């Protein structure tokens, strides 16, 4: 009878240990998914930012007007499915800032600014 009780208790310990291990692995997977999603969104914004900056630079070189560049940037940002934030001119270059919400499970409910990375794109508008 003593062995039976001992076996039951060791099975219970193993079950608790296995459940704790599974919970720990699930938490690690969730945290990893959240941060990888933000990192992937940040890296994926590089090309759309450059495309938006190029569209703005082309429009500005034709009209030599910042408002024309901004209108072209807004249109290109919509096509690239990013949010246009700002435009600026620095000498011969136009710089635009775009952002996109990362697909997260929990972090966007805590801090939207953390899960919405923004990236600058630059393009030459004067030769």
Image: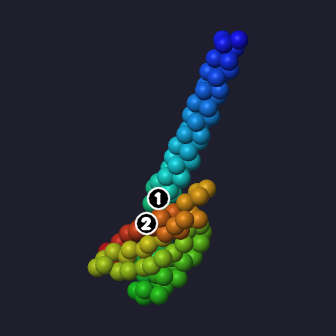
Return the x and y of residue 44 as percentages of the image width and height.
50, 56
Question: Residue at image x 66%, y 13%?
Answer: 2
How is the protein colored in the picture?
rainbow
Relative to residue 79, is residue 125 drawn left or right?
Answer: left
Is residue 58 among the parts visible in the rendering? no
Q: Nearer the viewer, residue 85 or 52?
A: 85
Element at label 1:
helix
Question: Residue at image x 42%, y 79%?
Answer: 87
Q: Nearer the viewer, residue 10 or 85?
A: 10
- Looking at the image, the residue that sits furthest to the left is 91
Q: Nearer the viewer, residue 48 or 3?
A: 3
To which residue does mark 2 refer?
Answer: 119
To which residue does mark 1 refer?
Answer: 42
Is residue 86 among the parts visible in the rendering? yes
Q: Are marks 2 and 1 in contact (CB under 8 Å)?
A: yes
Quick check: 43 above or below 97? Answer: above
Quick check: 59 above or below 117? Answer: below
Q: Give the quadrant of residue 15.
A: top right
Question: Residue at image x 37%, y 76%?
Answer: 94
Quick check: 36 above or below 100? Answer: above
Q: Which numbered tag is attached to residue 101?
A: none
Q: Calculate the distance from the C-alpha at mark 2 to the C-alpha at mark 1.
A: 7 Å
Of the residues under marks 2 and 1, which one precedes in the sequence?
1
């Amino acid at each position: 009878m003593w062995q039976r009780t001992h076996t039951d208790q060791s099975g219970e310990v193993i079950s608790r240990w296995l459940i704790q291990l599974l919970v720990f692995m699930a938490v690690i997977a969730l945290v990893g998914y959240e941060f990888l999603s933000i990192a992937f969104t940040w890296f994926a914004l590089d090309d759309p930012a450059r495309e938006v900056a190029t569209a703005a630079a082309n429009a500005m070189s034709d009209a030599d007007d910042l408002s024309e560049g901004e209108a072209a940037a807004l249109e290109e940002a919509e096509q690239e499915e990013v949010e246009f934030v700002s435009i600026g001119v620095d000498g011969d270059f136009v710089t635009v800032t775009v952002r996109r919400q990362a697909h997260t499970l929990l972090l966007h409910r805590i801090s939207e600014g953390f899960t919405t990375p923004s990236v600058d794109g630059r393009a030459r508008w004067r030769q």
